[in-house]
Amino acid sequence: MNSCKTTLSSFKIIGSIIFLLFTMFYVQAQTRTTKEAKVILVVDKDSNQITNIELFNTQITENEMNKKYLKSVFFLGLFKGRYELNNNAIMPKSESIITIYTDKLLFSNSEFSPGKNIKIGSIKTKEISRKKGELILKTY
């Protein structure tokens, strides 16, 4: 009788662990949607290309960002649309809109002036508007 209870308890524990692991991996891969979120765009100093998009965090310091992204500068922006989140980094889905405030460089005073073909990692974008101090992109 005791061995049946022990076996049943073991199955419950193992089942619970498997369920929790499945839930954890499923939630991380979920696609999210936002009407608007403040973001930090990470731009490589040498290539002047956007290498990453991070959710804006008021607690982040210049030192932390420079350690995480060597040889990069950081611009403020807005993100609208669908995305996946991985360690505070946004992976945009198609049809998302990214507004880059090219005159709002965090931790410095230079401006961002990319060419026409702008990629965010492996994500392709199309310029929809360019004004003084603002660049709006759409992913596809």
Image (cartoon, helix red, strand yellow):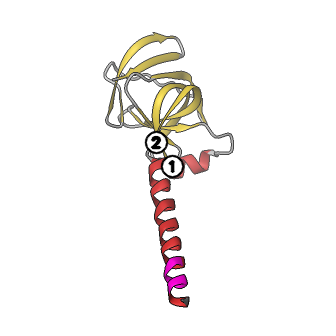
Q: Nearer the viewer, residue 68 or 109?
A: 68
Splitting the image into 4 quarters, where does residue 60 fall? top right
Residue assigned mark 1? 87
Q: What crowding class fits label 1: few (fewer than 14 Cα within 10 Å), some (14-19), or many (20 or more)?
A: few
Magenta segment includes 83: no
Q: Residue 19 in the image: state x and y as whole percent.
A: 48, 60
Which residue is the site of mark 2?
30
Secondary structure of the magenta portion, mostly? helix
| Callout 2 secondary element | loop
Q: How far from the left and from the top, in percent, is residue 5? A: 55, 83
Residue 15 against residue 60 in the figure, above or below: below
Q: Residue 7: percent from the left, percent from the top? A: 49, 82
Instruction: Tell me where residue 89 appears, x and y as whole percent.
Output: 49, 42
In this orientation, which residue lies closer to the viewer: 139 or 33? 33
Above-or-below relation of 20 to 33: below
Q: Which three-letter amino acid code belongs to the residue tagged 1?
A: Asn
Q: Residues within 10 Å of mark 2 (few under 14, many from 20)?
A: few
Using the numbered discs, state the Cα–Cα distance from disc 2 to disc 1 in whole angstroms.
Answer: 13 Å
Kind of residue at disc 2: Gln
**Who's the residue at 55% across and 28% down the image?**
34
Q: Quadrant of the C terminus?
A: top left
Residue 6 is covered by the magenta coloring? yes
Q: Quadrant of the image for the N terminus?
A: bottom right
- Looking at the image, is 88 positioned above or below residue 100? below
- Give the mark nearer the N terminus: 2 vs 1: 2
In the image, the segment drawn in magenta is 4-8
> Quick one: which residue is furthest to the front in this view?
1
Q: Residue at (51%, 49%) from the top-left corner?
A: 87
